[in-house]
Image: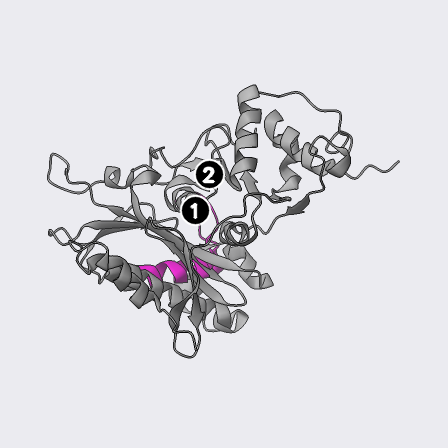
Amino acid sequence: MRTRVSLTNFLIDERRKHPQASGDFNSLILDVALACKRIARDVAYGALHREGATGAQAAQEQAGGLNVQNEVQLWQDLAANEHFVQVLSQNPSLAGMVSEEMAGPIWLHEDERAKYLLAFDPLDGSSNVDVNVSVGSIFSILRVPQKKSSAGKRTVADFLQPGVQQVAAGYAIYGPSTMLVLTVGTGVYGFTLEPELSEFVLSHPQMRIPEHSNVFAINASNSRFWAGPVRRYVNECLAGASGPRGQDFNMRWIASLVAEAHRILSRGGVFLYPQDTRTQTRQGRLRMLYEVSPIAWLIEQAGGAASNGREAVLPLAPQDLHQRMGFVFGSASEVRRIENYHAQDHAEDFDIPLFKQPSLFRFS
């Protein structure tokens, strides 16, 4: 029988490659995994868990509260955020944390052992819980910058690092099985939660994105807002074997970034959530710090590419905690094609009739 490798043992093996490393980094990742296990339990209960929502959760759901980005917070969002806060607040290696559901950072420890920062989306795609579609949690771990403010305190600016400076990134996906997908800069590894032991076990070593795929994911209901290069790419795919690409494509849209990323890591393809004419002032929809950067690093570690449609996103630093941007990622050849279309600045309509007026669903 093949020996199973637990997440704990995997991290120990990785640590042996770096003799100077302490156990603090491993402890932090294991605490993230613990928070994800608790969230997986809540998600698995579905509507049954909702019956037990009391106190702050029930009040927030009834009131239809908004987060800092003016988005309605579901009680699942708040519960997932609380799991992260409760578990990670006890970790002495964590200096601070920030999430989609919090206006600013929670500062924790200031001694020399507190070397890391955590940014996370506690429950990506939470609106899918009620219809039993996969959701997930996304996380990014950064080192604390050596230089403090003039007042000797940590500040928001400590989090505003480019994605290339991440030391760990990953997501948990809560679906038919719960998985933790992780990179520490040596490839991408998938761990499946063994329910009886409540242990993450290595099930997908060295995940790699297939170089070629005929699948793309985009929300076609936004087509009237797309820029010309995006419209060109989608139209060429939809034209199929008789069009300029010379092959048929399939279109997907799950409305969960984690689920989209997991499908692409497993089967290839490309995901597009581009900046469009509705988002000129905020440059996109997805949050750079705790959605775009960690997913981008996973994708690139698996041999894919991640872009804002024009350039790679990992070298870019956010200007504020909740900055948004357009996001395109997946099979490298498809991402490069989209970047080339933006470079050519094809803003005109094309002859392929799909997405032209008066309707996508016009019949002849």
Front-most of residues 37 and 303: 303
Q: Residue at x 60, y 62 (%)?
A: 131
Residue for badge 1 = 295
Residue for badge 2 = 306
- Residue 186 in the image: state x and y as whole percent: 34, 50
Q: Residue at x 29, y 41 (%)?
A: 165
- Residue 318 in the image: state x and y as whole percent: 35, 35
Secondary structure of residue under mark 2: strand
**Where, by quadrant of the figure, is residue 315 drawn?**
top left
What residue type is disc 2 on?
Ala
In the rendered image, the residue lying farthest to the right is 364
Question: Which of the image's four quarters has the N terminus?
Answer: bottom left
Front-most of residues 65 and 145: 145
- Residue 144 in the image: state x and y as whole percent: 20, 45
Position of residue 209 in the picture relative to residue 181 (left or right): right
- Residue 268 in the image: state x and y as whole percent: 56, 48
Mark 2–mark 1 distance (CA, rounded to whole Å) = 8 Å
Q: Residue at x 53, y 42 (%)?
A: 331
First to last magenta residue range: 60-84
What residue type is disc 1 on?
Ile
